[in-house]
Image: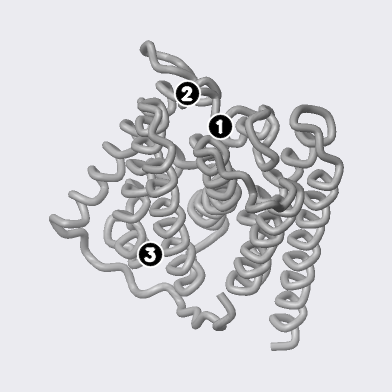
């Protein structure tokens, strides 16, 4: 994340090809499957809600790094954004747009992985779920890299594409750490003699580092930071008001959120000044 990206201007539009149309259909089908997976994740169609699946290992009170229940409302925003993206990629001029050619199949893969993660968790397989969410994180980071390197073509694209996928990346960054913690606790990890608060502080520092890294690479993009801060804030709320109660973990989560916020805002303001000078 420390390497400064090379941003290029949008390339001239080309004529849609057969593979372009196939990609658009693939994205659309993937979104439908993602919605079905989401419905299963909230207990529809006879599925087990995620908080109750895998013996409750991913519930809000399962580990020191579990976000409070309210944190998961962010999925409604992400799914709405993915719906908007699915529609956006069908707009005239988008089928053969260089950005869509770069990220379309990656976005489709992210939605399928999301649905797959839900199915794996409902099957009670925590360590396979860690593998799935880790792959999802890599896919979203790849998308983010492409979005930073190739500029969008206006405010609508900035909101629907960059905004949605940035929110998605930020939230999954936090969720991955929570997923790993859940798998370790369920497996009986004893902390190697260290208190849970120590491990929590280390992991939260890693999340903060990821947030700062995304801010540096994206030159102050707000969307990834927004959901990272959202997730960290709900970890703080859960540890300050619920079980397992841990004031040190809550404080560490707040500090991590502050670090990500300050770094992102500072980098964004610095980018604005440099653009003005240029």
**Residue annotated with mark 1:** 58
Identify the residue at image location x=70%, y=59%.
202
Residue placed most toward the observer, 73 or 278: 73
The crowd level at tag 3 (other Cα within 10 Å; few <14, some 14-19, many 20+) is: many
Mark sitting on residue 234? none
Dot 2 lies on which element? Answer: helix
Of mark 2 and mark 3, the one earlier in the sequence is 2
Residue 270 in sight from this viewpoint: yes
**Residue annotated with mark 2:** 53
**On screen, 35 above or below 221?**
above
Q: Contact, CB < 8 Å: mark 1 with mark 3?
A: no
Q: Position of residue 21 (x, y in %)?
A: 20, 50
**On screen, 250 above or below 269?**
above
Of mark 2 and mark 1, the one earlier in the sequence is 2
**On screen, 20 above or below 12?**
above
Mark sitting on residue 99? 3
Q: Contact, CB < 8 Å: mark 2 with mark 1?
A: yes
Dot 1 lies on which element? Answer: loop
Dot 3 lies on which element? Answer: helix
The residue lying furthest to the bottom in this view is 278
Q: CA distance from mark 2 to mark 1?
A: 8 Å
Q: Is residue 237 left or right of residue 155?
A: right
Q: CA distance from mark 2 to mark 3?
A: 37 Å
């Amino acid at each position: 994340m420390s390497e400064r990206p090379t941003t290029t201007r949008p390339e001239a539009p080309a004529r849609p090809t057969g593979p372009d149309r196939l990609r658009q259909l693939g994205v659309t089908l993937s979104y439908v499957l993602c919605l079905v997976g989401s419905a299963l994740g909230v207990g529809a169609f006879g599925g087990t809600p995620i908080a109750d699946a895998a013996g409750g290992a991913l519930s809000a009170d399962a580990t020191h790094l579990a976000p409070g229940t309210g944190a998961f409302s962010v999925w409604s925003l992400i799914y709405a954004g993915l719906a908007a993206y699915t529609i956006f990629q069908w707009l005239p001029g988008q089928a053969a747009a260089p950005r869509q050619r770069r990220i379309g199949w990656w976005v489709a893969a992210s939605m399928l992985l999301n649905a797959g993660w839900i199915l794996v968790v409902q099957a009670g397989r925590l360590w396979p779920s860690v593998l799935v969410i880790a792959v999802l994180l890599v896919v979203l980071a790849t998308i983010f890299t492409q979005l930073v390197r190739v500029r969008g073509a206006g405010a609508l694209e900035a909101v629907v594409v960059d905004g949605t996928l940035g929110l998605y990346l930020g939230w999954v960054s936090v969720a991955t750490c929570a997923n790993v913690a859940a798998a370790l606790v369920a497996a009986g990890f004893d902390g190697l003699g260290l208190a849970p608060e120590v491990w929590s502080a280390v992991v939260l520092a890693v999340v903060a580092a990821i947030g700062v890294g995304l801010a540096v690479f994206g030159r102050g993009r707000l969307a990834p930071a927004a959901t990272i801060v959202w997730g960290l804030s709900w970890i703080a709320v859960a540890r300050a008001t619920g079980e397992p109660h841990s004031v040190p973990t809550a404080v560490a989560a707040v500090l991590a959120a502050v670090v990500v916020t300050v770094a992102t805002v500072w980098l964004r303001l610095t980018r604005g000044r440099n653009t003005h000078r240029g």
